[in-house]
Image: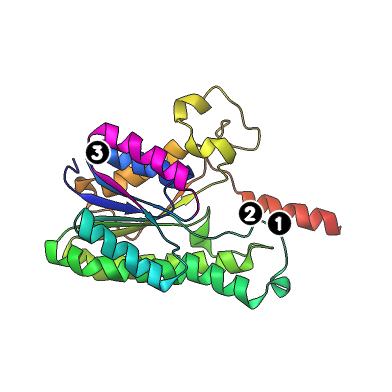
Amino acid sequence: MLSGKTALITGSARGLGKMSAIALANMGCNIAINYMQSFTEATVLQAQIDSIGVRSIIIQGNVALAEDVKMMARKVDQTLGSIDILINNAGPFIRERKHFVDYDDEEIDFMMQGNLLGVIRMDRYVLPAMRQRGWGRIVHFGFGRSSEARGWPHRAVYAAAKVGLVSFTKSLAIEEAPHGVTVNMVCPGDIKGAYKEKSIEAAQADSDPESPVGRPGTGEDVARVVAFLCHPSSDYVTGNIIDVSGGLDPIRNQIHHIEKTKA
């Protein structure tokens, strides 16, 4: 299906990025694995992908740094060839819950650079070659219900960056459609811990009382959507913001919890 294509997946040494990398390798893609600190995990994944029978490289780089973004795109081009598929999975996330007023300037800059500006820069580097070939796939990652642009208490900066990315996704999709390039966003729900690297089959025996579906979400759930969007026949699917959440709305649950606490 994608034999000979080259895919760069940012933040792909672990978690959802890793599962997306494996899914695309199984479709015949050569894979550029990007990591920031997880070198051991990246080398293990590289061996796994090589065993599938496609080529792969590992690249250390921080999507929040403009020079790293340029370096990553250039290194892939020099070693695997021009990037046909770009999966913008990486994005910094501050786990500590705190109000916006308590963020410092460095944290705000890091979150905006990593989740919005770094993605925009990466897209800009890969688009000329995609246009020249008349084919390309770009997938951005958001969070559940990103398209609704609702408030997310204690996650204001992250939410602002991802919601900005929603508009950029839709704008870029319109601009690039005549050139054979699709641009979409995948918005995972609350996929927790080890489930980020689990298969659907492994999770079907488990229960999740918070999920309307009744089971935990997995990395395979997300990777299947990524693979579909990258399929050659998915050329009519562009400009979409796709939730992979099992129907769960964790933000609304958090807001209700805050309201109850105040009551």
Q: Which residues are magenta?
A: 37-58
Q: CA distance from mark 3 to mark 2?
A: 34 Å
Kind of residue at badge 2: Ile
Secondary structure category for the residue under label 1: helix
| Residue under the image location 66 percent in, 33 percent down | 209
Residue 20, x across and y down, in percent: 38, 43
> Mark 3 packing: few (<14 Cα in 10 Å), some, or many (20+)?
some
Mark on residue 255? 1
| 183 relative to 180 in the view: left or right | right
Residue 97, by quadrant, is bottom right
Q: Residue furthest top?
A: 205
| Residue under the image location 36 percent in, 71 percent down | 121
Kind of residue at badge 3: Met
Query: Residue at label 3?
Result: 27
The mark nearer the N terminus, 3 or 1, is: 3
Kind of residue at badge 1: Ile
Q: What is the chief secondary structure element of the magenta stretch?
A: helix
